[in-house]
Amino acid sequence: DTEVTQTPKHLVMGMTNKKSLKCEQHMGHRAMYWYKQKAKKPPELMFVYSYEKLSINESVPSRFSPECPNSSLLNLHLHALQPEDSALYLCASSQDPLVWGSEQYFGPGTRLTVT
Amino acid sequence: AQRVTQPEKLLSVFKGAPVELKCNYSYSGSPELFWYVQYSRQRLQLLLRHISRESIKGFTADLNKGETSFHLKKPFAQEEDSAMYYCAPGRGKFQFGAGTQVVVTP
């Protein structure tokens, strides 16, 4: 399996809701990432997990909470989001991000709308 | 700041014409660089990695350390090349370039 899968594809949530985004890969990759992408803009890194440990948090607000239950799974827990958080959330995975050959494999994304 | 720069937001070319997307980097040492492509309604995917020196879908990219560039080139553009292209670093660096939208018209 050479794909990264993400669920759900679409999510609409109110500002008081709690929801979670899920990501899965079975390529044996040891790094997983969350990105936020606005329309016509590049992906912006949010979090990096390397060997199941959070290694980078790009000063993301605490209303976004990542979790890596095992090397194949990555979750993003959402709580009390703001309308400006509406975006495409991308998950990606790669080999060790610090070595050569660290190209990333992306999931299709979750289109999040906060109302 | 260390980054990759894509100076062109939009490139409009005719089918069959050459196309070149510019990417410059400011990392020291030996950077690892990639080109990713995002076709309409498809996931972001790897197009080229500089260490492979390969040609994918007719595209090539050479790392020029003297000019700190990693430009993407194709001699004859096709309509299916219309997409958003991102230059991005590897090896512990994660900031994508701003992207270049390529539109190939018949």
Image: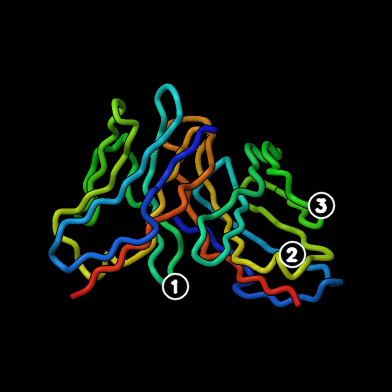
Q: Left or right: A103 with respect to A20?
A: left
In the image, is A98 to the left or to the right of A61?
left
- Amino acid beneath label 3: Ser
User: What residue is pinned by disc 3?
Assistant: A62
Q: Chain of mark 1?
A: B
Separation (CA) of disc 3 from disc 2: 14 Å
Q: Nearer the viewer, residue A35 or B102?
A: B102
For this rendering, which residue is in front, B56 or A28?
B56
Residue drawn where x is 58% and y is 42% of the image: A31
| Mark in front: 3 vs 2 | 3
The chain that hosts pointer 3 is A
Q: Secondary structure at mark 3?
A: loop
Residue B66's quadrant in the figure?
Answer: top left
First-in-chain label (3 vs 2): 2
Instruction: Give x and y (percent) for residue A114.
Output: 73, 73
Location of residue A36 with respect to B73 vertically, above or below: below
Marked residue chain, label 2: A
